[in-house]
Amino acid sequence: MNSQDRAKAAADGQDSSEAAANSSARRPQRTGRPRDPAIEEAILRATRERLATDGYTRMTIGDVVADAGVTRPTLYRRWTNKYNLAVDALAYGLQMQREAYPPLDVDGMAPVEAFTEAVKRLDPRYHNEQAMALHGNFMGDAEREPMLFEQFREQGVYPRCAELMQTLQHLQDAGAVRGDADLDATVVLCFGSYFGDYLLTGRTVPADHADRVVAALWPSIRADGYSATSQA
């Protein structure tokens, strides 16, 4: 995905509601009596837990309903198959993570501060400690379930990376980032740093991870005359 594609993704789908709307638009709308949101949330949470521990291929509807404390008819009144359930569980997880973020006021921050905050939001484990296992399982199922893997990228990866891209483009427009800076590579390096750290150490993300990543990358993209404390 190049910078133009990422910018379009940022404009078209900054939050999870857009992704959820896109996924639900591909399925018939649910009809009938109003559903209990607490039951749906229990099912979606149980699904995400199973996706992280078992992966999509080994996950069964039986396991999900047992974990959620509901019956099969209760689940099937809401989702007709495992694929649709997994897609909605992805959208639910992204929505929960986005709602956990504090507001990002780029204009009210120094450029390096805005950059750092956007990098912090790339962390897959920001709201879900099992996120690394979830990513690994979806990557492991990529060849068997390519459509689901694309949904995972669309709902779990693109919106998160698009926010960083949008932040960098904003700083570039403000003159804080060089016009010839490779923003695509910067986003990839920032996002990949979380996976690299996890695979090398197996630890939870260090509190200063984003600060260290930004300290390494900022000198290579900042415009002449901008320091770590300059305002955009």
Image (tube, grey):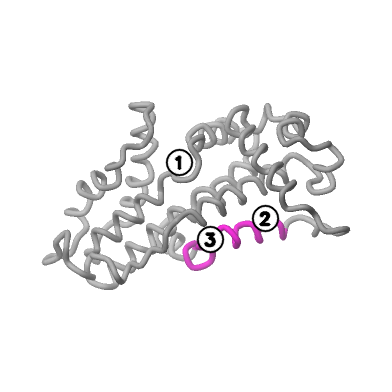
Give the extent of the magenta segment: 9-25
Viewer-proximal residue, 121 or 12?
Answer: 121
Residue 42 in the image: above or below residue 219? above
Distance in Å between CA atoms under marks 3 and 2: 13 Å
Identify which residue is drawn at 83% across, 36% down: 71
Where the N terminus falls, by quadrant? Answer: bottom left
Foreground tag (1 vs 2): 1
Give the residue type that dot 3 points to. Asp
Distance in Å between CA atoms under marks 1 and 2: 23 Å
Q: Is residue 50 magenta?
A: no
Look at the magenta stretch and give its main secondary structure: helix
Instruction: From the image, tell me which residue sits under label 3.
Output: 15
Identify which residue is drawn at 82% across, 58% down: 34
Instruction: From the image, tell me which residue sits under label 2.
Output: 23
Q: Say left or right for 172 vs 134.
A: left
Mark 1 or mark 3: whose residue is earlier in sequence: 3
Give the residue type that dot 1 points to. Arg
Instruction: Give the class, few, some or many, for how many residues have Cα within 10 Å of label 1's Cα (few <14, many ≥20).
Output: some
